Image: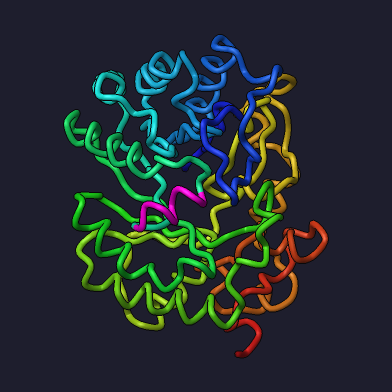
Amino acid sequence: MIVSWMTTNKCNLTCKHCYQDAGENKAAELTTPEALKLIDEIAKAGFKIMIFSGGEPMTRPDIVELVTHASSKGLRPVFGTNGTLITHDLAFELKKAGAMAMGISIDSIDPKRHNDFRGLPNAFELTMMGIENCKAAGLPFQIHTTIMDWNQNEIFDIMDWVKEIGAVNHQIFFLIPVGRGKEIEGHALRVAEYEGLLRKIMEKSRTLGIPVKPTCAPQFLRIADQLDIKTRYSRGCLAGIDYCIVSPIGKVRPCAYMMEEAGDVHNTPFDEIWANADVFKKLRTKAYSGACGKCKFNDRCGGCRARAAYYHDGDYMQEDSYCAYGRGL
């Protein structure tokens, strides 16, 4: 099981698609003692992987202490970061603290395109320096890329580049228009583009030499089965089943792109929220409506619950309207 804690809303970039609408930190963000308590409760709930994300997690001055504590509790600490603040010393400190891997965002291997999207003129250069610092510290890293209309033709070159620079994994996201992403909804792929590109990504993954994990695209497992491609993943959408998030102010939700709240760690221990929240219980029934409810890949794919909620007025149990298979296309 995996939990992602959005450690802060503070970020040094202004990425156009940010689900968190990150920038300034919020006064009510979890303090160090509250964060340590949260980590204890996450471990008690039986989670194995804890993602430190944001905002930008490297802006928290207590980040090394928190990673050390998570590691001591038997969790595998990993990161979702823009990579620009990973200094040489910090990379070594995080490695010593028990960090297992860095997930670093790159949306184009054209520095100008990446910088324009991320809102900082030298973002690409700083991120590459962060990657080199991870390498020096022996800290494994993977690359996170969000696909939109403006970079979809670049994705196969990006995949090759990810392998060449020594990444251990390539996580490919498909835009869900929440947070600042609402402002660029028009750049999301159309349904026909989504299915076709996802199929080509899976075909290329056969020979790439590193794992490829499409995210917010659970149909990749249905496509993998159809193409007889072996993956190490057993289910597409994990929201509320084997995955959830904790916001900077302690709200627990099924995923970063779903606004439905399961509880607040200020009022209820995380482990109790995970076990008892109605939204999680409902998601675990897998009793979906529409095409997802009738689909033979229901248990393998599950449809994107965030996309279902976004396009069906908050009904996260509805069908995933981006699924061409479910629509008979």
How far across and how far down the image is residue 235, in percent? 47, 61
Nearer to us in this view, 51 or 177: 177
**Residue at 41% of width from left, 13% of height from top?**
65
Above or below, comparing residue 254 to residue 39 in the picture: below
Instruction: Find residue 97 and report its horizontal and vertical position in percent.
Output: 30, 19
Residue 21, horizontal then vertical, whole percent: 65, 40
Q: Position of residue 151 (x, y in %)?
A: 46, 66
Q: Residue at x 44, y 62 (%)?
A: 214
121 versus 327 height, above or below? above
Residue 197 vs residue 287, the one in the foreground: 197
Q: Quadrant of the C terminus?
A: bottom right
Where 242 sits versus 220, above or below?
A: above
| Residue at 38% in and 31% down | 77
What's the magenta region? 110-117
Whether residue 86 sits left or right of residue 30 in the image: it is left
Which residue, as the protein is rendered here, is positioned at the far right? 313
Instruction: Report if residue 218 lies within the magenta region.
Output: no
